Image (tube, rainbow, N blue to C red):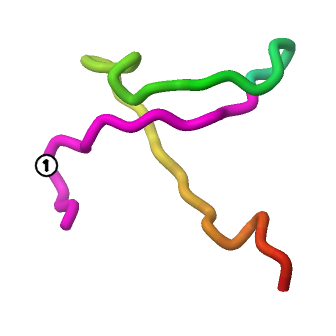
Amino acid sequence: MVRIGQEAVDFEASAYVEGVGFRPLKLSDYKGKWIVLCFYPGDFTFV
């Protein structure tokens, strides 16, 4: 279980970068920087 103040597990995901298109990004690429992670698990599902 993830808790506030606990280090996040490193993961890799595809992300859309304007002007570049989709590319893989790893959480470890941003080590030492502040980031905000937003997850919307239902956005791309067919209902």
Q: In which quarter of the image is the C terminus?
A: bottom right
Q: Who's the residue at 30% across and 35% down the image?
A: 10
Give the vertical position of 29 relative to 6 (above or below). Answer: above
Quarter of the rendering containing residue 7 = top left
Name the residue at the left extreme: 6
The residue at which mark 1 appears reads as 6
Amino acid type of the residue that numbered disc 1 sits on in the rendered structure: Gln
Please name the residue shown 76% across and 26% down the image: 22
Examine the image and state in which quarter residue 13 appears. Answer: top right
Q: Residue at left 29%, top 19%? A: 31
Q: Is residue 37 left or right of residue 45?
A: left
Residue furthest to the bottom: 47
Magenta region includes residue 11: yes
Residue at horizontal 55%, vertical 57%? 39
Q: Relative to residue 10, is residue 44 depicted above or below?
A: below
Crowd around label 1: few <14 · some 14–19 · many ≥20 (10 Å)? few
Judging from the image, what secondary structure is the residue with disc 1 in? loop
- The picture places residue 25, in percent across and down from the top left corner, at 53, 25
Magenta-drawn segment: 1-16
Judged left or right of residue 41, residue 45 is right
Q: Magenta stretch containing residue 40, yes or no?
A: no
Q: Percent x, y for residue 19?
A: 86, 13
Q: Residue 12 location, x and y as percent?
A: 47, 34
